DNA sequence: ATGTCGATTTGCT
DNA sequence: GCAAATCGACATA
């Protein structure tokens, strides 16, 4: 199922309202089918969001900002929605998150996989792949590497020239969305069981 | 000052 | 299938 066939002609940035309205799980749903675009070093790379995970600051033990945990790293999460939260995982990988909810409500959506759309050659180069593979953008660390996102981009607004999320008219309806528990959060106790990972059914671009 | 541990990926067995 | 890679955030002292 190639979602890029459904792309409309117009692409416009999401409004700040998008990021601040509704529960983070609903926003994580709505982000499926949106475009994640980077323009670094005069190289544009674009991917359709295929897989997301929701993290809620209120009562979600898997969330870095759970129960008001406010540190230098999580500070951006407590700001308004529509900003980038990038952090280093396992000392190796930058993971990209979209901050949602209003100021002081620290929710976020992790982007775990994209369907490559623009700048495929650049993505492959950054990933060290001689040609596009299913694994090129499958997994949160793979997405950031392919798009060139690093911790330097922490705190950027998501409607900027270099980094932004766009709506191109693709709508993913409920029946097309598969829900499952989030990956790698076993430490979170019963919250590890929450079905807050969302993928587009049938997409070959989801992570393993 | 020090010790633990990741919202992962990759390569080798 | 398993383990190494790699480093900063965080907690504890």
Image: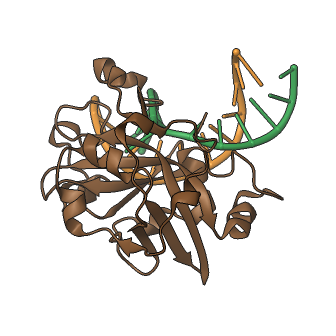
Chain colours: A brown, B green, C orange
Q: How many marks?
A: 0
Quick check: can you spot residue A84?
yes
Q: Quadrant of residue A47?
A: bottom right
Percent from the top left, x then y, of residue A37? Answer: 49, 69
Question: Does any portion of residue A72 appear in the rendered image?
Answer: no
Query: On the picture, is A86 further left or further right than A57?
Result: right
Residue at the spot 29% in from the left edge and 56% down from the top edge = A99
Quadrant location, the N terminus of chain A: top right
x and y, in percent, of residue A23 in the image? 19, 44
Residue at the image position 43 percent from the left and 74 percent from the top: A11
The relative height of residue C10 versus residue A39 in the rendered view (above or below) is above
Query: Residue A117: where, in percent of width, then height?
Result: 61, 64
Q: Where is residue A64, by image quadrant?
A: top left
With respect to residue A85, does A92 lie above or below? above
Q: Name the foreground residue: A143 vs A188.
A: A143
Q: Quadrant of the C terminus of chain A?
A: top right
Which residue reaches farthest bottom? A42
At 57% from the left and 44% from the top, the residue drawn is A139
Location of residue C11 in the rendering, given as x and y in whole percent from the top left corner: 28, 34
Residue at (48%, 74%) from the top-left corner? A9
């Amino acid at each position: 199922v190639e979602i890029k066939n459904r792309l409309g002609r117009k692409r416009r940035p999401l409004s700040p309202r998008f990021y601040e309205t509704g529960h983070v799980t609903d926003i994580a749903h709505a982000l499926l089918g949106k475009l994640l675009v980077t323009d670094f070093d005069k190289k544009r790379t674009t991917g359709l969001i295929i897989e997301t995970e929701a993290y809620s600051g209120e009562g979600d033990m898997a969330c870095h900002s759970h129960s008001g945990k406010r540190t230098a790293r999580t500070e951006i999460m407590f700001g308004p929605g529509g900003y980038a939260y990038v952090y280093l995982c396992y000392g190796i990988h930058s993971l990209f998150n979209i901050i949602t909810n209003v100021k002081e409500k620290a929710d976020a959506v992790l982007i775990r996989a994209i369907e490559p759309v623009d700048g495929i050659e650049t993505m492959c180069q950054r990933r060290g792949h001689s040609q596009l593979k299913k694994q090129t953008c499958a997994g949160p660390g793979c997405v950031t590497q392919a798009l060139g996102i690093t911790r330097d981009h922490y705190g950027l607004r998501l409607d900027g020239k270099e980094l932004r999320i766009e709506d191109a008219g693709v709508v993913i309806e409920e029946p097309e969305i598969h829900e499952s528990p989030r990956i790698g959060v076993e430490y979170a106790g019963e919250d590890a069981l929450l079905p807050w990972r969302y993928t587009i059914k049938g997409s070959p671009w989801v992570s393993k």
